[in-house]
Each structure stands twice: as structure tokens, then as C-alpha cells.
Amino acid sequence: MDANLPAAIGFLAEVRQDSARPPEPVFAARAFRARWHERTADRSLHTVLLHFGAPDEAYAREAGRTLVFAGELYNRDELLGLLPGRVLPGSDAALVIALFDVYGIHAFRLLNGRFAALLADRERAVAATDHAGSMPLYVSVAPGQVLAATEAKALRGAAPRGRSFPQGRPFPQGRPVRRRPGICQVPAGSVLDIQVSTGLCVAHRTWTPPAARRILPEDEAVDTVRRALERAVRSRTGPGTPLVVLSGGIDSSAVAALAAHRSAGPIDTVSMGTDQADEFAQARVVARHIGSVHQEITVPTGDLLRGLPHAVWAAECTDPDVIEYLLPLTALYLRLGDTRNDGDPGGDGDTGGDRGTARRILTGYGADIPLGGMHRESRLAQLDTAVCHDMDTFDGLNEMTPTLSAMAGHWSTHPYWDRDVLDVLVSLEAGLKRRHGRDKWVLRAALSDALPHEVVVRPKLGVHEGSGTTSSFSRLLTDAGIPKGFVRQAKRLVVEEIYDQVVVEGRHPDEVALDAVVELISERAAHHPHPIPR
Ligand code: ATP
Ligand code: MG
């Protein structure tokens, strides 16, 4: 296995009382596939695992339990300290199952990671997300049958349709999946405790965004942020050379600078731009300063927009704003180099081979949510209201999903959404976020010795703006005859139509004709000035 990558990046697992096998699932994430089938007196467990060469590391058995674990942990050392006298577990999966033996479902409250997990424990199935639900997890539950998968589309054809649960959900907190009755998304920071025979589910929260605000002297706040971010970057860089997707904005520049500090040799950085817009000059300043091996990738706007079906397929999201943020990154990941070495494209169970070019990628994604950076708001009450709102509503958008890069065979991780970084950033009082006339002040101050002054004070430019994605998408629609005042709504309809094709109906994104989708929405706009989304 490549020690630079997590053992697994996705799965479908089914616990059932009979021993029927689920059909072969479709995933957008690309990796080797391994399959297991185990039968005990109480139940059978089928697993299809997406892995990087060592599937056993993502599959742990102890005391009659089996754990399937995709993703990775960032506080292994702390966790190992909780298991004195034990043979120390090697893999993250083994560590979690050992903790479960001691703490039960409370083990999931201890974890700082980017993961999704399914544990089969005799008559019980336990499904868990990380604190931020950064690896999406979907379940379908019926008496005698529990399915869990890291992509909703993987449950297509496997999940029983339209169960008779109240509001179509097996538990009240479950997020329904558009046009897929019977499937719901496990909320961020949750563990579902499911009785397999009855399908009875109880959800427990393992993390919630802090609601209280800490008042700290400037120096202490700056120092706390710096240390938390350093730790998060350190725990994510792995033994190889990390690659940072770099815009030259403060968020990704901070990650790149901290990754470079702890790296023996130069790190890799890459920037994307389009024929319409780029931030190449800004990124170059940072690359030069930290001495990275830097690459620029220019994507023609037409190609960028033709990636819309891929972004929706990977993120399984219908929010057009989120898709606009994710589209340039999708284009970037898909061009990082051909990593197509699946070993098992036909699904024959091969688990060997070498992925070779799969990269560990660090991003600066998500810093604006706890810091209120998107809001360009100087009034502190309104800024904190925006932070509260964004922290209350991020769940289910799948902005952080690793599938975006996994579609191109890579593993991505976001230091700002480390559990401990998030706890620090969210809880700082708003006056530390907006201060001395600057947004994200505390972050800028925390990096002032590590980056050139012009980078530290550079105003925010969103990835959708800096790449011209928002304006190009708008132009695609107005060129098709959609009135300017309807563009926002039309973007939503385009994204929903694509979602229906690739997630609900199971089409491959290469088969989606974007022009035909735009034409369809444009016709609807012509006939109904205020069309109602279906
Ligand atoms: P700021 O928010 O201050 O602009 P930023 O550019 O680093 O900082 P975002 O604009 O929010 O952050 O973008 C989110 C993340 O997406 C970035 O941190 C970076 O990792 C990645 N990213 C954004 N634009 C590009 C780009 N042009 N090339 C490569 N990666 C990018
Ligand atoms: Mg930016």
C-alpha cells in the first residue's frame, strides 16, 4: 500500500439477515476494488471497498465485530494513548474497532478525521460520519437489511425503494436524497445505531459547531490559530511530497507555507486558470516565496463548463453555488495527470497493482465558513450571524467530499475543516475575524511571518470568481436565450437536471449532453417565466 494515501476512499456495505448479495455498485471515486462476504450466526456482511492497494487496512475484525473504514484519522497519537497495555493497532480501522471495544459508540466522539464507517456488531449496524460529514455517507434501512455507501449512486439498484418510515426516513435527522425515497444521508458528526432485525435507528451527535464565543487577547488568538493550523497541516501531509492546490489567496497560501515549513524538500503546488481569468501571478508570488515546484494549468472555458456533469456526479449536490466553487477544482483534479490504473475496471475483484501517480492533495478550502470570509461584512453582529448560519447549513452540501479528487484517482484533504481547527476558528469572537479593517484578520496575522506582506493582506477572491466560472456559466445561459433575471434560477435547474441524469438515473457524466440540458431549461424558461423546479 502507498503509505502516503489512506487505505480506502469509499465503500458499499450491506448487513442483512439473509445472505443475498447486493448488485455491483457504481462509484465516481476511482480506486481498486475489493469484495468481502462474511456470514455469522446472526447476519451476513457484504462489502465492496475502494482502496489504494491494502484493503485489509480498511477492514478490521475484533470480538465478533467487523468495521469497514474509509478515510483517515488525524489524532492517532492521542487515540493510541487511550489504549494502554494493548497491542497497538496498526491501521486506522484497527484503532477504531479497538476504541469501540472500550467506548462503544462514544468512540466516534474521540475521532478527529475525514472518514465514513460501518460497523457490524452481531444484531447491530453502526454507521458513522466524521465531525463535518466530510466524507458523505448514505444509508438505506429496512427490517432485516441495512445498506451504507459513501456515494448515493452506489445504492442505486441495491436499496429497497420507498420504505414505510415516517417522512420516508428511518430516523428523524436523516437528510432525504432527492428523488431517491428510502435513501437518506447520515448527518455530519453523527453515529447511527441500527437494530438490523427491526430497522430501528437511533442517531447520536458526535460533534456540533460551538455556539459560544471565546474572547482572547490578539496575541493569544493568533498563536492558537497558528498552532492548530500547523498541527492540522502536519497530520495531513503524510510521508511523501504533498501537493497544495494554490490560488495565492491567504487560505491556500497559509496551507502551502506551513506544509513547506515541515517538508525536508520542496513541496508541489499547482494553480488553475481559464482563458477568461486566472490568479497565476498571485500564486507565483507564493510559490517563489516558499520554494515550491509550481505548475499552472489553463482550462478552456468550454471544457470547464463541460465538466459540470462530472462535478455534480462526484459531489451529488444540487446547490448551484457549491457546484460553481467545485467546478474549477474538478477541472484541476482531472488534469493533474493520468492516474487511471484501477486494476479492476470490469469488477473482477483484482486487488493488486500500483496506482503510481495518485497524489495526496491539501487545499485551503473551507476557511471562509468559520471565519465569515465570504460575507465581506464589517458589522460584527451580522458577521457572527453569517458564521452561525453557514455552520448550521453546510451539512448535506458535500462541499468537502473527497470524491471530487477521487474521481481523478487522488486523495484530497482540507486542514481548515480539521475538527480542532474548526473548534478554534468558529468559537473566536467576531471581532477577531474582522479587525483593523481586514476580513479573516486572525488568520492573516497568524501567517504574517510566513508569507510576503502582499499575500497576507490580499483581499479575498473566491475560486468561482478568480477562475471566471460564475460569469462563464451565466454567459452559457444568456447565450442560450435565458433572460438575465432568470439566470440564478436557471443555474439551479441545470444542476438539478444533471443531478437527475447522473445520480438518480445512473447515467455516466460523459453521456450527459450539456447543450441539450441548457436547451431544455431555456425552453422551460421561455414557456414559464417562473418555472417551478420539478
Ligand atoms: P481567499 O479565500 O482569501 O481567496 P483562497 O483563494 O486560498 O483564499 P478560496 O478562494 O476560498 O481560498 O478557494 C478555496 C480553495 O480552492 C483554495 O484555498 C485553494 O486550495 C483552491 N483554489 C482556489 N482557486 C484556485 C486556483 N485558481 N488554482 C488552484 N487552486 C485553487
Ligand atoms: Mg481565493
Image (cartoon, rainbow, N blue to C red):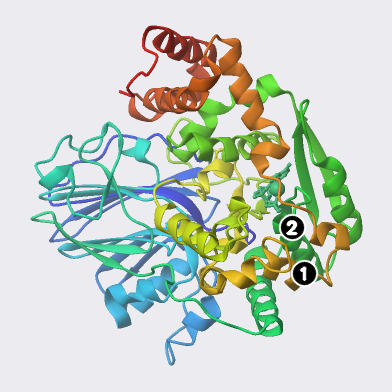
- Percent across and percent down for residue 246 are 75, 50
- Percent across and percent down for residue 129 are 38, 60
Residue drawn at 38 percent across, 69 percent down: 207
Instruction: Determine whether label 2 and label 1 are within 8 Å by CB.
Output: yes
Q: Would residue 163 appear left or right of 362 to someone viewing this image? A: left
Can see residue 48?
Answer: no
Asked whether 58 or 256 is in front, the reply is 256
Q: Would residue 145 appear left or right of 222 to someone viewing this image? A: left
Residue 460, placed above or below residue 345: below
Asked whether 290 or 520 is in front, the reply is 520
Q: Amino acid at mark 2?
A: Ile
- Quarter of the picture containing the C terminus is top left
Number of the label disc, if any, that sits on residue 112: none
- Percent across and percent down for residue 202 are 19, 63
Number of the label disc, if any, that sits on residue 250: 2
Reading the image, the residue beneath label 1 is 447
- Beta carbon at label 2 within 8 Å of ligand 1: yes
Residue 22, placed above or below residue 233: above
Q: Point out the residue furthest to the bottom here.
A: 85
How many other residues sit within 10 Å of disc 2, few (<14), some (14-19) or many (≥20)? many
- Percent across and percent down for residue 448 are 81, 70
Can see residue 501?
Answer: yes
Asked whether 32 or 396 is in front, the reply is 396
